[in-house]
Image: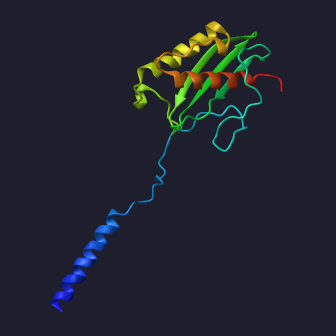
């Protein structure tokens, strides 16, 4: 009986070790996060990406006002948001922010330290005001993905101001 008891203890110990090493559910538990970036329209697809009526390169035909456009999400779940102001047929102000997959603004304060992208946020916005045409904005060296998100979001923002 002593031999059977030892065998039972060994089997139970091995079972507990195996159960402890089993993979856990990979679904993360919810945690409080900042509010997501505003969506420029209620027209979004199943991934949360805008489905605007039009994407345009210039403010030609765009009503005066402030407009917001959001890029598609990238392979890591990040996206860009452009808010721009049109007055008298010209783009007068542009703000660009890029967000992580958990809807946090990419900034040094939030731990994002990729210098080229951080510099690109302001430089792309300035260039759009100078050029007045999204297609004339150059990709920012070292931040090609950021540049693509900026251009797509800017075109969508401009598209919000067209008469539909």
Q: At 44% across and 19% down in the image, what residue appears?
A: 116
Q: Nearer the viewer, residue 90 or 139?
A: 139
For this view, does 49 lie left or right of residue 102? right
Residue that sits furthest to the top in the current view: 130
| Most foreground residue, 109 or 127 | 127
Residue 161, by quadrant, is top right
Q: Residue furthest left?
A: 2
Q: Quadrant of residue 67?
A: top right
* Residue in view at x 68 percent, y 22 percent: 155
Q: Residue at (52%, 16%) from the top-left corner?
A: 140
Left or right: 47, with 53 as reference point: left
Residue 124, position as x, y percentages in the image: 56, 15
For the image, the number of numbered tags is: 0
The percent position of residue 75, horizontal first and vertical second, equals: 53, 37
> 151 left or right of 23?
right
The quadrant the N terminus occupies is bottom left
Q: How is the image coloured?
A: rainbow
Residue that lies at the very extreme toward the bottom in this rendered image: 1
The x and y percentages for residue 93 are 63, 14
Task: Where is residue 151? Give x, y as percent.
Answer: 62, 21
Image quarter hosting the C terminus: top right
Q: Is residue 158 left or right of residue 18?
A: right
The residue located at (53%, 25%) in the rendering is 145
């Amino acid at each position: 009986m002593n031999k059977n008891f030892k065998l039972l203890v060994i089997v139970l110990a091995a079972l507990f070790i195996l159960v402890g090493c089993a993979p856990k559910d990979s679904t993360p538990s919810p945690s409080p996060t900042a509010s997501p970036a505003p969506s420029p329209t209620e027209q979004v697809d199943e991934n949360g990406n805008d489905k605007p009526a039009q994407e345009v390169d210039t403010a030609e035909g765009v009503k005066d006002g402030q407009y917001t456009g959001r890029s598609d999400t990238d392979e890591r779940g990040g996206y860009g948001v452009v808010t721009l102001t049109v007055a008298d047929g010209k783009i007068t102000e542009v703000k660009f922010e890029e967000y992580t997959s958990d809807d946090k603004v990419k900034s040094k304060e939030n731990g994002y330290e990729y210098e080229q992208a951080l510099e690109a946020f302001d430089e792309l916005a300035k260039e759009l005001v100078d050029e007045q045409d999204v297609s004339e904005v150059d990709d920012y060296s070292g931040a090609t993905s950021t540049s693509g998100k900026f251009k797509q979001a800017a075109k969508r923002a401009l598209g919000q101001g067209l008469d539909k």
